[in-house]
Image (cartoon, rainbow, N blue to C red):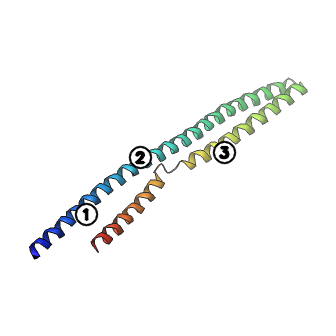
Amino acid sequence: MAHIEGDKRSESTAELVKDLSREVSQLVREEIALAKAEMTQKGKTAGRGAGMLSGAAVLALAAVGGSMATLILLLGLVMPAWLAALIATAVYGAAGAVLALRGKERISDAVPPAPEQTIESVKEDVQWAKSHAKSRNG
């Protein structure tokens, strides 16, 4: 009788290991999918930030061009024209500064480039698997 009881016990343990293995495999697949989605989102955010920084660079170059035009017009002593050039320079410079700050924020939102939500989810899954295995064995 003890021999038959031992067979049932090892059979149920084997079944438990098989079930746990299947569940862990499914969890790993789901976590990989989550990590891919999270990294894609971070990449998009960083791309938008880089685009804003590029726009800031273009506007900064325009500001430099405007300041050159201002200097040239000042030297020519044409008051209304230099004032207009100075205003345009200030507008381009302000727009470039705003884009630079917003682009920097976007890039910092995407850093670090690790899938943080997935890491937390994996930690929770490990805890779940440990408690699940204990409850089945206990």
Name the residue beneath numbered marker 2: 33
Name the residue beneath numbered marker 1: 16
Seen at 39% across and 50% down, the residue is 30
Crowding around mark 2 (Cα neighbors within 10 Å: few <14, some 14 to 19, many 20+) is few
Seen at 31% across and 67% down, the residue is 133
Quarter of the image with the C terminus is bottom left
Seen at 67% across and 40% down, the residue is 99
N-terminal of the pair, mark 3 or mark 2, is 2
Seen at 43% across and 56% down, the residue is 119
Q: Position of residue 129 (x, y in %)?
A: 35, 64
Number of the front mark, 1 or 3? 1
In the image: residue 68, left or right of residue 16: right
Name the residue beneath numbered marker 3: 101
In the foreground, 106 or 75: 106
With respect to residue 72, does 123 lie above or below? below
Q: Position of residue 113 (x, y in %)?
A: 48, 48
In the image: residue 40, left or right of residue 53: left
The amino acid pointed to by label 3 is Leu
Determine the image quadrant of residue 72.
top right
The amino acid pointed to by label 1 is Leu
Local SS, label 3: helix
Determine the image quadrant of residue 88.
top right
With respect to residue 2, does 29 lie above or below? above
Determine the image quadrant of residue 66.
top right
